[in-house]
């Protein structure tokens, strides 16, 4: 038998937590306080004792030192910490990937990831799309496997915390994403597997990330066939170009 070469089914995102969004330098509390509050909210969302956390992953020069967070949370053991350096939209997904790899490899059991999907949640729950109905946004080079889960998590939080959630929205956060949001990727079989069944095929955009080494060029055609074989022809056309044309206003020739 060939050895198992995937981590599918072995790791999962189990909770999400956030704090209010502030412009740079305008938060009324220290960043580490906000980070700790977000961690505790994520643990509450997951039904998880915070003392089970044994790892941290982040990106882009995060100033929240893992040792300081571990001490503040009273963690009995810190087994893994990782900082994904470098810019670009892939930083957030890289931090999630590092956390997943650490769990799959046995280095940790429960890893907290910082600075990943917070901007999407803030946009979809802020009421900004009611004020600016023509506004569109996209996450670039951050993958798509997390999108369906995030939409479910946002809707669940909005429903269960409806007594105190602000602002009150006319639609669910997931509906705002489907109407206004896009997400780009290079290779993401997990996200593509559920793109049609979750109604997200109109939101996903493929790119080959030329000339970066993590992209698919010069083997893009092979990558497309390898990962999009289960998509319908219409869905594949949207993901490969029509969605991007709609977002950026590019003209499309009729067949």
Image (cartoon, grey):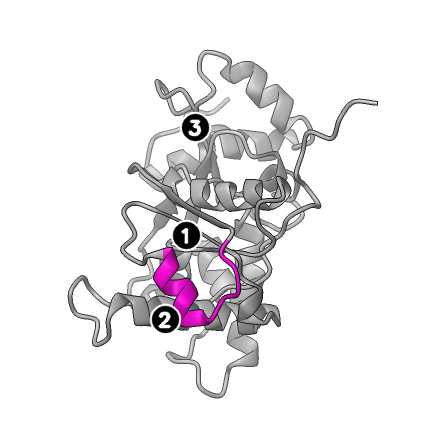
Asked whether the residues under the numbered discs 3 and 2 touch, taking CB atoms below 8 Å apart as contact, a structural biologist would say: no
Residue picked out by circle 1:
116
Q: CA–CA distance between discs 1 and 3?
A: 20 Å
Residue visible at 50% across and 62% down?
175
Mark 3 Cα shell of 10 Å, populated few (<14), some (14-19), many (≥20): some
User: Is residue 171 shown to the viewer in this render?
Assistant: no
Residue visible at 64% across and 48% down?
11
> Element under label 2?
loop
Q: Nearer the viewer, mark 1 or mark 3?
A: 1
Q: Earlier in the sequence, mark 1 or mark 3?
A: 1
Q: Earlier in the sequence, mark 2 or mark 1?
A: 2
Q: Which quadrant holds the N terminus? A: top right
Find out whether residue 67 is within the magenta segment.
yes
Residue 170: x %, y % from top left: 45, 74
Residue picked out by circle 3:
207
Dividing the picture into quadrants, the one containing residue 10 is: top right
> Element under label 3?
loop
Q: Give the extent of the magenta segment.
A: 66-78
| Residue 4 drawn above or below residue 121 | above
Residue picked out by circle 2:
19
- Residue lying farthest front? 76
Residue visible at 30% across and 45% down?
60
Dividing the picture into quadrants, the one containing residue 31 is: bottom left
């Amino acid at each position: 038998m060939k050895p198992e070469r995937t981590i599918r089914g072995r790791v999962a995102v189990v909770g999400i937590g956030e704090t209010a969004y502030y412009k740079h330098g305008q938060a009324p509390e220290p960043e580490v306080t906000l980070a700790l509050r977000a961690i505790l909210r994520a643990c509450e969302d997951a039904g998880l004792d915070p003392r089970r956390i044994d790892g941290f992953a982040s990106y882009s020069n995060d100033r929240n030192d893992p040792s300081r967070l571990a001490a503040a949370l009273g963690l009995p053991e810190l087994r893994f910490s990782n900082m994904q350096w470098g810019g670009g939209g892939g930083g957030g997904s890289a931090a999630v990937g590092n956390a997943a790899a650490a769990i799959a490899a046995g280095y940790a059991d429960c890893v907290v990831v910082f600075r990943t999907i917070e901007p999407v949640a803030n946009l979809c729950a802020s009421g900004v799309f009611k004020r600016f109905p023509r506004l569109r946004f996209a996450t670039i080079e951050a993958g798509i496997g997390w999108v369906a889960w995030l939409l479910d998590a946002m809707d669940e939080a909005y429903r269960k915390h409806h007594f105190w959630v602000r602002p009150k929205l006319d639609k669910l956060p997931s509906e705002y994403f489907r109407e206004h949001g896009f997400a780009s990727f290079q290779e993401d079989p997990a996200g593509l597997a559920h793109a049609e069944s979750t109604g997200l095929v109109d939101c996903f955009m493929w790119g080959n990330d030329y000339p970066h080494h993590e992209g698919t060029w010069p083997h893009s055609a092979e990558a497309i066939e390898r990962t999009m074989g289960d998509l319908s022809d219409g869905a594949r056309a949207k993901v490969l170009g029509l969605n991007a044309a709609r977002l950026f206003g590019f003209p499309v020739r009729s067949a």
